[in-house]
Amino acid sequence: MTRTEPNPTRTVPLPLREQADIRDRWLTQRLLDLLPDLMDRADIDLWLVIGREYNEDPVLATLLPATWLSARRRTILALLRSDDGVTAAAVSHYPVGQFLPAWSPDDAPDVPADESQWRAVRRIVEQADPARIGVDVSSSFGLADGLSHTEHRLLIESLGPYADRLVSAEDLAVGWLETRLPDEIAALHALNRLAHEVIAEAFSPAVIEVGTTTALDVAWWIRQRFHDLGVEPWFQPSVRLQRNGVPLVDERGVLLPGVPFDAVIEPGDLVHCDVGLASLGLKTDTQRNGYVLRDGETTAPAGLRAALRTANRMQDLTVGALAVGRTGNEVLATARAAAVAEGIQADVYSHPVGFHGHGAGPAIGQWDEQGGVPGAGDYPVHLDTVYALELAVRRPVPEWGGQCVRLALEQGIALTADGVAYLDGRQTEFILIP
């Protein structure tokens, strides 16, 4: 009997066992195809990724077998660049998937296990004699700053004179976390499709009884639906309303919807959701908009439709600015300058997405930092990355007496050598709720 290779684009979510097979296959491919070039780009000869059970380095979780739900005791992974690629070894109490075992507590039964484990790390360094040893410390990226104070101290003590060779692995850690395989991008297409399908179901009479259902009811329905489908949200879904006669409120200089989060949904409401799901070790981040039809209406008011077109235009301007080599701050400045030239009032706060929802890589603004983001905004754009294209525009709606609406969109996009692709397409029309 021939075993069929799991295909993440076939359907999502997949059974857990198939997910584990896919994730472990991806890890092998990433170690073989991605890591050597990433280590060369960062000028790192040996990468040490260290974490203790329930206090894992965020990078460590992306290197462990799919059946490992956390580190076990102290888990140390040593990734050594060589002429043949990368040698991946584990200094661990337990076998770590495909990593070569580089130590066992039985190697030195008369020495405490902790001391013996650090001696093994020292032995690896002495034998490899690397010029630059990367460790996960970073002031700009929390995801690249996973080496705890205690583990850092113990590592320095164990390395002795070799400790002078320790350098920040920030660029390597960020590169590892942000770079996507083609198969991972294909899976993210499918996961974004699932998110869009759940939102469409949530914004329908099957869920919303106009005049009775609250925005909070819909948010909890989305979370429960994800759970029932076998995926989990990585943040609590939110549903917000905007309504004629309820102006936006100013919060730290940003205009936000003023309708209470638990308000009952009424005819004429603009309904917005923000959701993110997790499956196959990957995350999505999506925002979409619906409109509740009034009696006699067959579509949303022209002013709201114009706001959505403006938001789509702002997506075009941001994607047009997303060029390899530019920093996140440069992308932000270019997109905002283009918006000003076209008379668009907009905020851009896009971010990488992949292993993590707010992923490592260039920050392209934050909702309350439109002048640039120090540190993370100075990181450059690379190919084979996925972003949540997140932004909002503000525009008056004549049918609402000139009241301003804030139309927010968030859409997964992939940046490859072929250009930018919208993952399962972007929203260009409102979801109509009868």
Image (cartoon, rainbow, N blue to C red):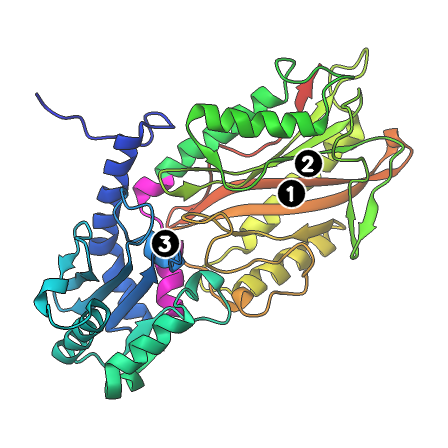
* Quarter of the view holding residue 110: bottom left
Q: Nearer the viewer, residue 121 or 408?
A: 121
For mark 1, what is the residue?
Answer: 313
Q: Which residues are magenta?
A: 169-185
The N terminus sits in image quarter: top left
For mark 2, what is the residue?
Answer: 309
* Quarter of the view holding residue 269: top right
Horizontal relation, residue 409 to residue 16: left or right: right
Q: CA distance from mark 2 to mark 3?
A: 31 Å
Check disc 3 and give the amino acid type.
Thr
Horizontal relation, residue 15 to residue 422: left or right: left
Going from N to C along the chain, the mark reached first, 2 or 3, is 3
Does the magenta-highlighted stretch encompass residue 172?
A: yes
Residue 16 visible to an observer of this rendering: yes
Check disc 1 and give the amino acid type.
Arg
For mark 3, what is the residue?
Answer: 179
Could you tell me which residue is drawn at 36 percent across and 78 percent down? 153
Query: What kind of secondary structure does the magenta stretch mostly adopt?
Result: helix
Check disc 2 and give the amino acid type.
Arg
Horizontal relation, residue 171 to residue 410: left or right: left
Could you tell me which residue is drawn at 22 percent across and 65 percent down? 79
Outermost residue toward the top in this view: 296
Q: CA distance from mark 1 to mark 3?
A: 27 Å
- Residue density around tag 3, few if under 14, some if 14–19, many if 20 or more, within 10 Å: many
Q: Nearer the viewer, residue 249 or 383?
A: 249
Could you tell me which residue is drawn at 59 percent across and 69 percent down? 374
